Image (spheres, rainbow, N blue to C red):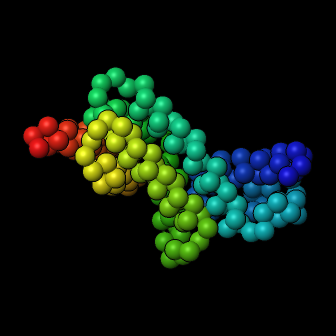
Amino acid sequence: MPEAESSTRKRIVDAATKLFYAEGIGRVSVDAIAEKAGLTKRTLYYHFKSKDDLIAAYLDGRDQPNLKQMAGWFETAEGGADRKVEAIFANLARVARHPKWKGCGFLRTAAELASMPGHPAVKAGSRHKANFEKWLAAELSAHSIAAPHMLAREIMLLMDGAFSSMLIHHNPDYIKAAGHAAATLVRARLVSATIS
């Protein structure tokens, strides 16, 4: 892809990301995205054949930065795997206190597209959640924790449940409680490994 084309595509995705995250995918028009990007709608459609493809690009663009951020929180936390997992949740609670925080963009988008399971954005969200589970399972395995894949999935359930509760209650304490529960699960696996 030529550099100018890549730069234009990035402008479109950046504009879409800001609008979709702030307002939701259903409330944002292609016209609004083109305007925010400072381009014509025709130029937008040159780079993306549909709004659906642009929604998927928005989520795909959030995948690695989100994973890198959570991996950074895990790596820099002091203590064992339980404290490192809990640090991810503690940092999410801190981020959730920011006035512009609107929840997990992947879950919000999936909720808007619940009747369309084959939508490219739903698939992008599924890939992101699977990437997080895979990364976390590898970290737990490196800390010699038994059944790391199942534990990573259990932690993912706690995280997504907390994200949902925070959207309803607007209270980051839910994710802190989920972090405490996740750390407890990790400690329980560590204890059962030393007993057996």
Q: On the rendered structure, is 60 left or right of 145?
A: right
Q: Residue 191: tell me if it is visible.
A: no
Q: In the displayed orientation, state which residue is furthest to the left.
A: 195
Q: Residue 187: tell me if it is visible.
A: yes
What residue is shown at x 59% (from left), y 64% (from top)?
121
Q: Position of residue 58 (x, y in %)?
A: 65, 54
Q: In the displayed orientation, state which residue is furthest to the front.
A: 196
Q: Position of residue 91 (x, y in %)?
A: 41, 33
Q: Is residue 97 above or below residue 165?
A: above
What residue is shown at x 57% (from left), y 60% (from top)?
124
Q: On the rendered structure, is 173 left or right of 12?
A: left
Q: Position of residue 21 (x, y in %)?
A: 59, 51
- Numbered marks: total: 0
Q: In the displayed orientation, state which residue is furthest to the bottom.
A: 115
What residue is shown at x 36% (from left), y 37% (from top)?
142
Q: Is residue 30 above or below residue 22?
A: below
What residue is shown at x 78% (from left), y 63% (from top)?
48
Residue 191 versus residue 82: which sits nearer the camera?
Answer: 191
Q: In the displayed orientation, state which residue is furthest to the top.
A: 78
Q: Is residue 146 above or below residue 41?
A: above
Q: On the rendered structure, is 154 left or right of 48?
A: left
Quarter the C terminus occupies: top left
Residue 40 versus residue 138: which sits nearer the camera?
Answer: 138
Q: Position of residue 174 (x, y in %)?
A: 30, 44
